[in-house]
Image (spheres, rainbow, N blue to C red):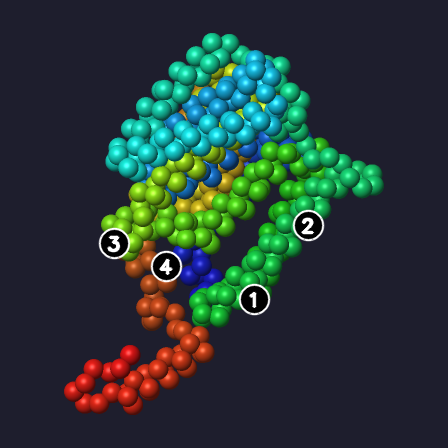
Amino acid sequence: MNALLNTLRGNVRQYGMIIALAAIIVLFQISTEGVLLKPLNVSNLVVQNAQILILAIGMVIVIVARHIDLSVGSVAAFVGAASAIMMTQYDFPWWLAVFLGLLIGTAIGAWHGFWVAYVGIPAFIVTLASMLLFRGLTLVVLKGATVGGLPEQFKAIGNGFLPEIGPDTGLHNLTLIIAVVAVAILIVLEVRRRNAQAAYNFDVLPFPLFVVKLALLTVVIMYFAYLLADARGLPIVGLILGGLIVVYTFIMNKTVFGRHVYAIGGNVDAATMSGVNTKRVDFLVMMNMGLLSGLAGLVTTARLTAANPKAGVNFELDAIAAAFIGGAAVTGGVGTVVGAIIGGLVMGVLNNGMSLLGVSIDWQQAIKGLVLLLAVAFDVWNKRRTAGSGGAGAEATESSAPPPDKLAEEIEAMEAELSVDSTPGETPKT
């Protein structure tokens, strides 16, 4: 029970948002008389919010590194416009236009990184200038008009679905297969993670609760896959989004770069004195945001089947809101990719549910603003609560987890060797 309570206390923001998302889904499912979770609506929900979720992944990394990027909507619009011009006016193959669009987005991100990391201009100012710059360049490139006539292969990025395979079961077989594989991988990773924590005597969930957790995750994933399979299958953009979640979760949790990002966001001075190349990390963080902005712009243009001068408006606000609602701290150092996705889903379900209920767009904006304010207020309250009580697990009698048995034996042997080798008045040998 103590392990469960400590886990809940230590992840109160993350679990709180999961509970909030579940409550919002139940509320709109009831109020819309079951329309919210109809297979076709769930499929549309994924397609319509994919670009915001892509941006939220990059934005949470930027916020963890104690920066902000206000230009993502304008960069997305510019990349989408430039790629559309390449395909329609210069007859570039669609795949080459996509590659060059991603390259443009990365170059813009590197441009931001140069000013932020090496010149020292705050990211707020740099990206605010770029927001105006690239919104204007989008109008220049498109000459104020919408550019259509894009190749079908390109439009499939935003509107296409995975192909059908296997016998006719009434469902999309490939979607269900992908879901089963995802569940199997998730279970293996969770078991390995639990075993690693137990090996170092960290608190872990009791085995029955751990099994319940895995069962709930399996049910949620398979039910979501069933809904998609009952419609048109997994959207191509959904597969792209899933790949990004896996890759960036691994980067932030398992790589040196991810650890450096968290270190810089937590305490930049301490990170610098520890040998972290903060300028390089800041540069890469902003460059990565440019890459994902370019990808979001390509997805948006493909979904709309045209490049529009007004594309990407308010994308930056939605991405920032998703990151903060999903648990990112305003002061940096805290936030996860999965949390940002949960925050983006909260915003997406709110938009979709209110639209189904016929709520006007002005009230939708007001309600989303209130949700963002409450999420940040909850973050501030949670920080004050943990600071006042010593944080999650403050009641523990030990300041750190005891070492595993093998490590304890090695330490004891080393201490015994030092005591034998040392003589009175001399420094023990090392």
**Mark 1 → mark 4, Cα distance in angstroms:** 21 Å
Residue 78 relative to residue 166: left or right:
left
- First in sequence: mark 2 or mark 1? 2
**Mark 3 → mark 2, Cα distance in angstroms:** 46 Å
Disc number lying in front (3 or 2): 3
> Going 54% across and 16% down the picture, which residue do you hit?
85
Q: Quadrant of the C terminus?
A: bottom left
The amino acid sitting under disc 1 is Phe
**1 above or below 141?**
below
> Going 52% across and 27% down the picture, which residue do you hit?
100
- First in sequence: mark 1 or mark 4? 1
Provide the residue designation for mark 4: 392
- Which of 343/192 is in front? 192
**Mark 4 → mark 2, Cα distance in angstroms:** 35 Å
Q: Position of residue 355 (x, y in %)?
A: 55, 25
The amino acid sitting under disc 2 is Val
- First in sequence: mark 3 or mark 4? 3
Label 4: which secondary element? loop
Provide the residue designation for mark 2: 180
In the picture, the disc for residue 207 is: 1
- Which of 216/316 is in front? 316
User: Would you say residue 126 is visible in this rendering?
Assistant: yes
Residue 279 relative to residue 6: left or right:
left
The amino acid sitting under disc 3 is Met
**Mark 3 → mark 1, Cα distance in angstroms:** 41 Å
Provide the residue designation for mark 3: 273
Residues marked 3 and 4 touching at CB (< 8 Å): no
**Mark 3 → mark 4, Cα distance in angstroms:** 28 Å
**33 above or below 253?**
above
**83 above or below 262?**
above
- First in sequence: mark 3 or mark 2? 2
